[in-house]
Amino acid sequence: MAIEVLPATDYQDVATMVGPKKDPNGNVCWCLSYRVTPKENQALTRTARGRKVSALLRAGEPIGALGYDDGEVVGWAGLAPRASTSFATNRRIPHVDDLDAWSVWCIRVRPGHRGEGIAHEMLAGAVRIAREAGAPAIEGYPVDNAGEKVEMTMAYVGTRALFEAAGFEKAADTTSRLDGFPRVVMRLDLR
């Protein structure tokens, strides 16, 4: 299956992938947890989160990538220059160097489309988008789960194996853990 991966620009498609599913006033992530400062992330609740995403899109800010299968949105990758994310100041996830790397921090596949390789295509698309934007490198911060099962709600960061399959290499250990697994910095040079 081949999907088309494009920079996220359509608010409704972003909402389909990361917005509330049942209650439009639901308090969900909107993939902002790493995209804004921790203080702002805590202050944004319910519909304010969707309004923040809308404002970022209107400003032309990179917030992610959307994957489409025959026009239907089926995948998401949180993607932006590291400098515009909380990874710029995160104490648990170290900087490898001073390059203006981009970060990919969340990969989601729409229910009903899982197990089709879409996560791999979303990561490949994120790499292409970062490269086309002139990024010298792209990083991810997945769990190093050594093949063990990762709980579904925590799998959004990806696994080391997913990133290795896309050509990324481990660049550093972190002091961050998710679902009991250590997270690692995975890096792909785009120069």
Image (cartoon, helix red, strand yellow):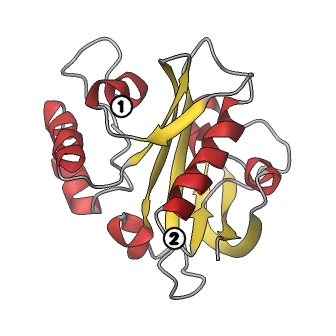
Residue beneath the point at 56% across and 50% down: 126
Q: Is residue 100 above or below residue 39?
A: below
What quarter of the picture does the N terminus occupy?
top right
Location of residue 19 in the rendering, given as x and y in whole percent from the top left corner: 33, 27
Q: Label 2: state its secondary structure.
A: loop
Location of residue 147 in the rendering, given as x and y in whole percent from the top left corner: 85, 43
Given the image, on which type of amino acid does mark 1 rest? Val
Residue beneath the point at 52% across and 83% down: 99
Residue 179 visible somewhere in the drawing: no
Q: Crowding near pointer 2: few (<14 within 10 Å), some, many (20+)?
A: many
Q: Crowding near pointer 1: few (<14 within 10 Å), some, many (20+)?
A: many
Given the image, on which type of amino acid does mark 2 rest? Ala
Mark 1, residue position = 14
* 173 vs 59, nearest the viewer: 59
Count how many numbered circles sit on residues in the image.
Answer: 2
Residue 84 occupies quadrant: bottom left
Q: Is residue 129 above or below residue 115?
A: below
Location of residue 108 in the rendering, given as x and y in whole percent from the top left corner: 55, 33
Q: Earlier in the sequence, mark 1 or mark 2?
A: 1
What quarter of the picture does the C terminus occupy?
bottom right
Q: Is residue 52 above or below residue 104?
A: above
Q: Label 1: state its secondary structure.
A: helix
Residue beneath the point at 38% across and 76% down: 89
Residue 189 relative to residue 34: left or right: right
Residue beneath the point at 43% across and 69% down: 82
Location of residue 168 in the rendering, given as x and y in whole percent from the top left corner: 74, 63
* 173 vs 64, nearest the viewer: 64
Q: Which mark is residue 135?
A: 2
